[in-house]
């Protein structure tokens, strides 16, 4: 029988090379698998191996989630934890896997909260103005403008290389699971990126990251998020104003401008139309706000 540590290592390799999951996703899944196996060792006693995992019943999963909930885990996080455990068990059991069936926590699906166009621009400008060096400010301004202007995920933008230069009217982006898509590039975005590249003290080779850190290596997303946090506090913007919120704003504003769902799905790189349809709720909520604020009988 194969022990838990070896199973988890093999699963990590499977997620990286076959499923092409991001490093962030892999870390979260592996941490869950490690917590789950540690719990089973206490709960059932003895070493966790393929035989023990194959013999699990729904009550084992319920007990694990009960312990996690007692540690303060919310509904959404508990649902993600259960999903990761099921994925691990399916991998361990192979095609014959019989994962214990149980209903996960009910999660109320909230609507993405868009950032107004003027707020997005003010955010990028404040981040640039308060950067330690001029070229760093130009870099962050260009990056945030790209998130809002092209609807990229922050990981997609940071994965771009110098091969994308000079930016034309379109850009090829690699998204989740290695899927590629073509997105339009606004002149303002192309200009901001060109200004950053000209100011950058490090040469940007075709195989090197387009957005570089202060020491010339790949820019880390945490650096960008920290800059955005400082800027939104200075501007008095709500906590929902994050780099990812700029992508939501891109989608919402396109839909409000008349874009159809199928086109929006392609631009965002969503695997299913259901992921894109949530933005119809955003637009409806926006129209309802306008109605309530403007209609004399609202």
Image: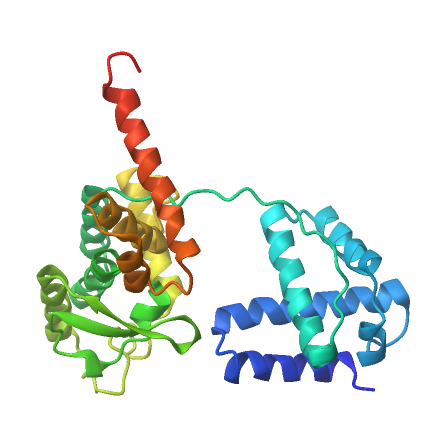
The reply, left or right, for residue 27 in relation to residue 175 is right
How is this picture coloured?
rainbow
Note whether 147 is above or below 14 in the view shown: above
Can residue 156 be seen at all in this image of the molecule? Answer: yes
**Residue 138: quarter of image:** bottom left
Image coordinates for residue 204, horizontal then vertical, percent: 20, 83
The reply, left or right, for residue 131 in relation to residue 87 is left
Q: Which residue is drawn at 22% across and 51% down?
A: 259
Q: Residue at x 24, y 17 (%)?
A: 295
Can residue 32 be seen at all in this image of the molecule? Answer: no
The quarter of the picture where the N terminus appears is: bottom right
Image coordinates for residue 125, horizontal then vertical, percent: 18, 51
The reply, left or right, for residue 110 in relation to residue 243 is right
Note whether 276 is above or below 31 in the view shown: above
Note whether 223 is above or below 115 in the view shown: below
Q: Residue at x 23, y 59 (%)?
A: 131
The quarter of the picture where the C terminus appears is: top left
Image coordinates for residue 202, horizontal then vertical, percent: 20, 81
Residue farthest right in this picture: 45
Note whether 37 is above or below 130 in the view shown: below
The one of 237 and 148 positioned closer to us in this rendering: 148
Image coordinates for residue 187, horizontal then vertical, percent: 9, 63
**Residue 268: quarter of image:** bottom left
**Residue 213: quarter of image:** bottom left
The reply, left or right, for residue 96 in relation to residue 148 is right
Q: How many numbered marks appear? A: 0
């Amino acid at each position: 029988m194969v022990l838990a540590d070896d199973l988890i290592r093999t699963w990590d390799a499977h997620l990286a090379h076959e499923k092409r999951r991001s490093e962030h996703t892999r870390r979260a899944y592996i941490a869950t698998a490690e917590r789950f196996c540690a719990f089973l060792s206490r709960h059932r006693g003895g070493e966790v191996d393929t035989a023990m995992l194959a013999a699990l019943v729904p009550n084992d999963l319920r007990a694990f989630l009960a312990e996690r909930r007692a540690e303060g885990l919310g509904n959404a996080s508990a649902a993600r934890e259960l999903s990761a455990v099921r994925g691990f068990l399916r991998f361990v059991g192979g095609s014959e896997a019989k994962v214990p069936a149980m209903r996960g926590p009910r999660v109320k699906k909230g609507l993405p909260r868009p950032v107004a166009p003027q707020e997005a621009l003010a955010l990028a400008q404040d981040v640039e103005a308060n950067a330690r060096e001029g070229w760093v400010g130009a870099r962050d301004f260009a990056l945030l403008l790209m998130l809002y202007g092209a609807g990229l995920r922050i990981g997609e933008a940071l994965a771009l290389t110098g091969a994308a230069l000079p930016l034309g009217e379109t850009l090829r982006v690699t998204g989740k699971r290695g899927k590629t898509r073509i997105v339009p590039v606004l002149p303002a975005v192309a200009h901001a990126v060109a200004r950053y590249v000209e100011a950058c003290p490090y040469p940007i080779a075709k195989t090197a990251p387009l957005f570089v850190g202060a020491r010339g290596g790949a820019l880390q997303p945490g650096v960008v998020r920290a800059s955005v946090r400082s800027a939104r506090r200075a501007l008095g913007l709500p906590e929902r104003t994050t780099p990812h919120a700029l992508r939501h704003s891109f989608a919402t504003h396109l839909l409000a401008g008349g874009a159809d769902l199928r086109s929006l799905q392609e631009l965002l790189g969503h695997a299913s139309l259901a992921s894109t349809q949530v933005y119809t709720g955003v637009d409806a909520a926006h129209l309802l706000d306008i109605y309530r604020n403007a209609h004399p009988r609202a």
